[in-house]
Image (tube, rainbow, N blue to C red):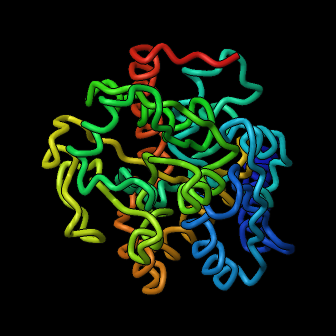
Amino acid sequence: MKSRSLIAAAALALFAASAGAQSWPTKPVIMVVPFPAGGGTDAFARPLSSILSKQLGKQVIIDNRGGAGGNLGASIAAHASKDGYTIFMGAVHHAIAPSVYKKLDYSIEKDFSPITVVAVVPQVIVVSRRIKDPDLKSFIETARKNPGKLNYGSAGNGTSHHLAGELFKQAAGIDLAHVPYKGAGPALQDLIAGQMDVMFDGLGSSAQHIKSGTIRALAVASATRSPALPDVPTAAEAGVKGYVVSTWYALWAVAGTPKDIVDRLVSETNKALAAPEVKNVWASQGATIGPSNPKDMGGFVSTEIAKWARVAKSAQIQID
């Protein structure tokens, strides 16, 4: 009798889990984006949320929560209900944060369940129109003659923009003043307005502005040229060998979200990424899709955390 009861209980739990996946979602899903509108994360989150809304039959609503280099939004998402109605669109910044912040009230590996790495894009070195140097080599020479007088903007202290800038300073042997913002969007707007000299930005958020001529690309930080900007040389081609930096954007559920709902999110996200309209947007921004299942994404994030820890230590970046 006892074994029958256990079998019945297991069957009931399995049925309940299946029913949960089929009934979810019954209301809008909140996608927390931990940076202001207009940044790279936002550029990929919005088209993805639009397709997911159609597939799920319920709105996937973007909730921009910028601040603390992406950590404010991550903290909000990490402490949300574990019911599948809050998902988190994080980025490479969240693999950097454990190494540069002394205290975090969340863990990207323990407080979140991986879904999919939705986009991987090279970073690009972009300058405002007030910079007259025609190429990267000339820009570096100008910077060498004016140590600390040219500035670069980032999405905040300890973000990938910040560390990419520090790496570039080391590789090029120059001194640039760092100006942190509350997200890549505001920094990019100041670059467009001529209030900032240079940014080391994700191609996803900069591509449209490069093509429209409001900012100029001096080089892409990838091993090969980007199909999205075929006329822009790599940093190595422009004279800075070994400078290869990519940024990425990924989707997580809150840890403890029922597995059947996480599985549904994985399936629906990968389906959305295969939609022609999404593929076209990704291609226009030089993006590729990263690891598309939770196990592979978890391994990818762990590798990234270790890589950026070495960079942070070398650059001696530590934030209270």
- Residue 250 in the image: state x and y as whole percent: 54, 53
Residue found at x 49% / y 40%: 152
Name the image quarter holding the N terminus: top right
Give the tally of numbered discs: 0
In front here: 244 or 4? 244
- Residue at x-position 19% and y-position 38%: 240
On the question of residue 292 being in view, the answer is no
Q: Nearer the viewer, residue 80 or 102?
A: 102
Indicate left or right for 14 with 207 as reference.
right
* Residue at (38% x, 30% y) in the render: 146
- 84 w.r.t. 182: above or below: below
Q: Quadrant of the C terminus?
A: top right
Q: Where is residue 10? Give x, y as percent.
A: 74, 50
Instruction: Please tell me in which quadrant of the rendered image residue 153 appears.
Output: top right
Res 264 quadrant in image: bottom right
Left or right relative to 176: residue 97: right
On the image, the x and y values in percent for residue 216 come to 37, 62
Q: Is residue 135 visible?
A: yes
**Looking at this view, is 306 or 237 the one in front?**
237
Considering depth in this image, is 56 or 146 the residue closer to the camera?
146
| Above or below: residue 273 compared with residue 14 | below
Tell me what residue is drawn at x 29 percent, y 44 percent.
139
Among the 4 quarters of the image, the one containing residue 38: bottom right
Residue 315, given in percent of the width and then of the height, sits at 43, 18
